[in-house]
Image: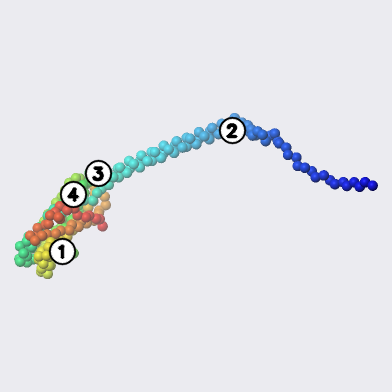
Amino acid sequence: MTITWNFPLPELPVYGRNRDQDHPIKRHHSASYYAHRVKESLTTRVSKLICSIFLGLLAIVGLITFILWLSLRPHRPRIFLNDFSVPALGQGGSSGPENAQINFKVTARNSNQGIGIYYDASQITVYYQEKSIGGYQVLTPFYQQPKNSTMFASVLSGSSLTVTGSQWKHMVNDRSRGPVIFRVELTSTIRFKISSWNSKRHRMHANCPVGVGYDGLLLPVYMDKRCPVYFS
């Protein structure tokens, strides 16, 4: 007797090659597509060119503006201490503060090119130990031409010199130990004149340290020294 077993045979996978995969798919575009691409490319190039021209012009205008700003920007006056003396100190100070006097010369220099300066009011004050001991006021306004200098010179004595007996003794004691230190302050209200235009008013301050020697004369280290200037 023969027994026959019938088992289903498994299906084996079939591997094949698709001939369409051997070559890339070619896409065909119409003439209008290529015309559109060319138009976009030209538009981009023109836009970049316009931007480059605009940025170049902007840089040139900025450079010209910066140069004009440098040439027209007003500079503060330059203040120099030229001379300062207390003759009575050179004589030992025995005459006392009643007969004392202070001589000084201060120069204001306008270093601007093509810019003038109006001085509406000016005041020079002398300080000793940060206390005022006299002053000189310029009541007459004046105009200073470009590249020009103006000298403030005066002699403080009598009512314009307010040195007390105690201050005078300190000065005499300082003289015996070394230089006597003072401070000269120039304050003025100024305006800059650029062509036909006048600037707003500025309150200018210049502080000049001063040292006199045993003879009551200005020490060489302080002579013609430039004084710091600031506005308030």
**Marks 3/1: CA distance?**
42 Å
- Left of 182 or right of it: where is 43? right
Write down the residue under mark 2: 33
Q: Nearer the viewer, residue 216 or 50?
A: 216
- Three-letter code, disc 2: Tyr
Residue 5 in sight in this render: yes
Write down the residue under mark 4: 109
Write down the residue under mark 3: 195
Write down the residue under mark 1: 128
- Which residue is outermost to the bottom? 166
Q: Where does the image place residue 125, in percent across and percent down from the top left?
A: 16, 60
**Marks 3/4: CA distance?**
19 Å
> How was this image coloured?
rainbow
Crowding at dot 4, Cα within 10 Å, few <14 / some 14-19 / many 20+, comes out as some
**Marks 2/1: CA distance?**
91 Å
Q: Where does the image place residue 133, in percent across and percent down from the top left?
A: 14, 64
Foreground disc of the pair 3, 1: 1
Above or below, 32 against 201 in this view is above
**Marks 4/2: CA distance?**
75 Å
